[in-house]
């Protein structure tokens, strides 16, 4: 499953990097990507700063690296491997991981144990792993890979080039766009959590809506996204959701938003475009997190966040306020000693105890 | 999968609503339920207040809604659709969602790929989806729907009319009551988390107990409920648990309790009847949350909550105390400036820095 | 599935306990293990203290318990059941649960519906449940039990005596040691959450690494452990992870560490040996929690924890500091009243409102 060696000139072109000395690239083939401290001959290493450069040179003693990818103005000593320059080493790194990805795929074609409803439409080139179930009226477009044990419910739409990893459940009627990746165990389209107080206990609000996942979304393992009550829960194009997140009914997430692991978003909340939500944050229902806002990991949000602001804490406040509050709480000991002394001096009798 | 149109008189009767003008209902058929801002001809809309009424009338310009469901004293202008009155619009709404629910079900009967142990008892009318496994000695009662990929372990009991969505795992011996709904990926009966310090590392406390889920419970997607150590972990009748919740070993949850998404409850804790736990709350082990208590979302509880009280915060305190504490923290800046000034005036030397 | 009755002498030997009176054990057979308040004839009960002893004696009125296991110096009255002494009753209890565990296992052998790749190596005595999938190049060693619906990806290694409960997903190439237990729905080896800002939105950091689970690890239901970016995410021997935990890419967890339910650990963080992490705690990325440290449940950690220290809070601080901070916040009302009074006395004009 190892990818073929790649000419270094070709690699530079594909990641958008510029060589210090184009002639040094000739005849060099790259066999992989590694980290500064684990050199492998023929591999490329991405360097962020002078410290990483030094670590790489120290570690690679005797190992012939194929190339270094470094930011424009970082000085590299004579005798180092060929240097490629890139404005954004992190972006170069992402592109290198794509070049050297040899992701395992199920055996092409349809496994004998896959069960496809007679009236489902599944493009001829779709891969269906063992024990897959495709429901009545479902539509799976060209280039999809549906891994072992996935359940694609009736009337589900799966756009072109989408990949479902094992054990994904798509409830009836949900719609996935193109090039979506859904990791193992994710559940899309379960009922939202809604009940009304009735004379004999809670009466269920049935969920008649659906979920729409737009193009180029990635959804983490065991994440759950509930269907809308009447309309659709929606995840905007290019947004990425990590593992074990809970997205409530009727939530709308905008485009190019990043939601880290174990985040929970309450029903009917709207998350804008380009938002970043840190791991473990909890967002109450019926809120709005406007475009470009950020919420720190572990926070509990119970108010809207204006566009572009960064908030944190429990309950979350603007980050500047949270930092100031933490600073003031750090001074409480001094405040308390002051009050105790002042009180003692004033009364000599009603001293608070410490 | 669309339900048949329903006579409006019949609809009024079934949700327990009273028409302003019974004659206005005659000959009207309802084809669906919609929201105030998305009118569809022939649909019914539930209205909470004057603002929603106005929004509905504005949006429905030209669209002939079948009826409005409104609280008793809300004034509705002439020319509006027929009005049904209900004391509790949220309850009316829940009942309307039930009327218009056309939930997809697996094809009735037993899928050819379902595997049923010879000595399992499965009622004749039970639906078994593809790749279902029913273990030895299991008992699945009348009217159950066991969706694709579910694993019902040996000696499990599943009460009448219960529905398991895809990929549910029931460990050996667990017991589900009647009309229980378990959403996709939920795991009921895994080992509790218990170890004892031994000479060579942790020694496992094996879990010999079980899980009992009483009637009319709903359990969310990818939620986990651990088996008891010696006795049973128990979820009381009518209680509802949202997605991605963790219920520890030996926990007892009472009746008609609501537990929102990503809540974690530590081992041996008791949750009373009619309790409400907000999303993302964490409850330590060996606690008691008494009947009718509430815990705010995102809280971390490490003490018992008395009956009927509402608590919140990290660590959680009575809500009044938490609100007061937040108010006082909001005054810390003023307190700090006071102390700084007083200290500076007093000493002119040991000024705290800001 | 009940285990055979066990001679009490044999039981004493196997849990490492010493009888008060060896002759009292002769001819006694033990049929099970129970709790102080639920006596069963022929069962053994573990007692921690005088209070539990009294409760047991009161409850067992007329029921002939087989034996009591008690700490060395606890005085037991005449007429009680035979007494076994053990220094650590919790450890004795764990060993008793092991003795009486009759855990259900799938039917030995390979289910007809299990699908094994031609070039996978599966030891002859391995149990494969229904609908299991073993991928190309995988290696499953002797004594493993792979329960229904598990997906063992290509090139996965599963060490001897490991047990996978239903619906576990092992992504391609992950490595499990010997005697590992993975509970239902756990996902091991999904992509880490990494993206780089590109000109047209986030560009994915592909994950070329793997996950290594060492010997004697237990992993809870629906827990997710992401693969490394280039290297391995690693869980050290003897460590235990509860349900619904998220372990990020490149994380390294040491040996004999306990991680309670719904914990989230960010990418590249290192957790030492013998660490304890309470339920619902969230740990940011790129941190180190050193050997023997503890983090309280519900905390949010954003700094390293030195070896052996206990931390808690949001953000987490050393526990002593957190407790002191909570004490000082509890005094804020008094501080605030002092400041108000002082301010009022000083100015009689700019009184802050309460």
Image: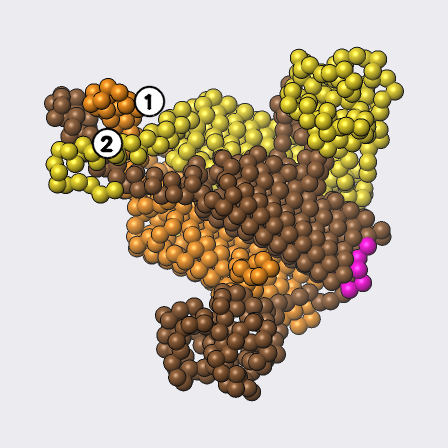
Chain colours: A yellow, B orange, C brown
**In the figure, is residue B110 to the left or right of B322?**
right
Q: CA distance from mark 1 to mark 2?
A: 15 Å
Q: Where does label 2 land, which residue? A: A338
Chain bearing tag 1 is: B
Q: Relative to A319, say whether B313 is above or below.
A: below
Residue A116: x and y in percent read: 73, 48
Chain bearing tag 2 is: A
Residue A167 appears in the picture as rendered: no
Residue B353, label in figure: 1
Residue A85 appears in the picture as rendered: yes
Task: Using a 10 Å C-alpha cutoff, classify the residue at mark 1 as few (fewer than 14 neighbours), some (14 to 19) or many (20 or more).
Answer: few
Q: Splitting the image into 4 quarters, where does residue A73 fall?
A: top right
Query: Which residues are the magenta region?
Result: C121-127
Can you say which quadrant of the picture contains the N terminus of chain C? bottom right
Q: Relative to C61, say whether C101 is above or below.
A: above
Residue B232, magenta (yes or no): no
Q: Splitting the image into 4 quarters, where does residue A7 fall?
A: top right
């Amino acid at each position: 499953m190892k990818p073929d060696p790649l000419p270094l000139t070709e690699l530079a072109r594909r990641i958008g990097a510029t060589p210090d000395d184009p002639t040094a690239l000739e005849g060099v083939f790259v066999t992989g990507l590694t980290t500064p401290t684990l050199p492998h001959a023929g591999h490329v290493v991405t360097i962020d700063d002078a410290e990483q450069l030094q670590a790489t040179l120290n570690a690679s003693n005797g190992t012939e690296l194929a190339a270094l990818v470094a930011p424009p103005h970082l000085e590299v000593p004579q005798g180092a491997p060929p240097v490629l320059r890139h404005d954004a080493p992190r972006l170069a790194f992402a592109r290198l991981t794509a070049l050297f990805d040899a992701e395992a795929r199920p055996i092409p074609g349809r496994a004998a144990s896959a069960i496809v409803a007679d009236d489902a439409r599944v493009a001829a080139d779709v891969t269906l792993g063992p024990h897959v179930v495709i429901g009545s009226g479902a539509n799976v477009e060209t280039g999809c890979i549906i891994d072992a044990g996935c359940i694609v419910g009736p009337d589900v739409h799966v756009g072109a080039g989408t990949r479902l990893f094992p054990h994904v459940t798509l409830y009836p009627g949900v719609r996935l766009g193109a090039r979506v990746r859904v990791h193992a165990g994710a559940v899309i389209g379960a009922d939202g959590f809604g009940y009304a107080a009735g004379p004999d206990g809670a009466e269920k609000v049935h969920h008649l809506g659906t979920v729409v996942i737009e193009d180029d979304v990635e959804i983490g393992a065991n994440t759950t996204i509930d269907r809308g009550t009447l309309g659709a829960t929606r995840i905007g194009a290019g947004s990425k959701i990590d593992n074990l997140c809970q997205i409530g009914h009727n939530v709308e997430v905008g485009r190019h938003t990043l939601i880290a692991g174990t985040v929970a978003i309450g029903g009917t909340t709207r998350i804008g475009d380009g938002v970043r939500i840190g791991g473990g944050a909890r967002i109450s229902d019926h809120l709005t997190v406007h475009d470009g806002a950020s919420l720190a990991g572990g926070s509990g949000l119970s108010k809207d966040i204006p566009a572009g602001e960064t908030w944190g804490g429990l309950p979350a406040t603007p980050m500047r306020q949270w930092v100031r509050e933490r600073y003031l709480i750090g001074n409480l000991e001094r405040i308390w000693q002051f009050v105790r002394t002042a009180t003692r001096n004033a009364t000599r009798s009603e001293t608070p105890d410490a």
